Image (cartoon, grey):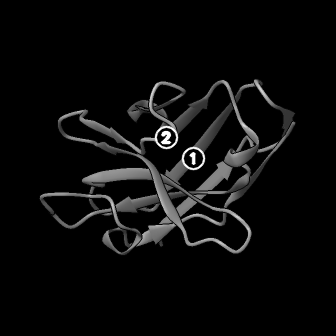
Amino acid sequence: QVQLVESGGASVQSGGSLNLSCVASGYWTFPKCMGWFRQGPGKEREAVAVLYTDSGKTNYAGSVKGRFTISQDNAKNTLYLQMNSLKPEDTAMYYCAAGVRPRVDWWRPTDFAYWGQGTQVTVSS
C-alpha cells in the first residue's frame, strides 16, 4: 500500500518561510516523478513543482519560481518543498504526489497516481 504523508503546513505572515515534507512508503518500484500540488478555496488543484527522480530535473509553476525549491532525500524517502517569501496567494492545501509509470512529461494532476492527504498553508498579509 503506497502512502504519502505530508507535514510542515502552518499559518505564517507574508514574507515568511515554510518547509513542507512528504514521507513516502509502500512502493514496489521507486517513483519516476514526485511533485507538490496545491488547491486553494474554490480553485482547481494546480502543480507547484515536480522532480524527476532519475535525472533530478525540476519544473516550477511561474508563480513560485525563484521562491520555492523542491528536493528529495532518497535515504529518508522524503520529498521537500522549501517555500520562501510567502504571499497570501500561496494560501492553499498542499499535496504531495507520486507517479510510478514512465512518462515523458509530468505536470497535470492526472499524471500522478498516488496522493497524500494534504497539509494546510495559510499566509496572512
Amino acid type at circle 2 is Leu
Of the two numbered discs 1 and 2 on the same chain, state the one appearing first in sequence.
Answer: 1
Q: Which residue position holds label 1? A: 22
Name which residue lies at 49% across and 62% down.
46
> How far apart are labels 1 and 2 at the CA level?
5 Å
* Residue nearest the observer in this picture, 29 or 35: 35
User: Please, is residue 31 above or below residue 88 in the view?
Assistant: below
User: Please, is residue 84 above or below residue 124 in the view?
Assistant: above
Q: Which residue position holds label 2? A: 79
Q: What is the count of numbered marks?
A: 2
Q: x, y percentage for residue 115?
A: 51, 67
User: For this view, does 99 lie left or right of residue 102?
Assistant: right
Query: Mark 2 and mark 1 in contact (Cβ < 8 Å)?
Result: yes
Amino acid type at circle 1 is Cys
Label 2 Cα crowd, 10 Å radius (few <14 / some 14-19 / many 20+): many
Occupied quadrant, residue 117: bottom right
User: For this view, does 62 lie left or right of residue 64?
Assistant: left
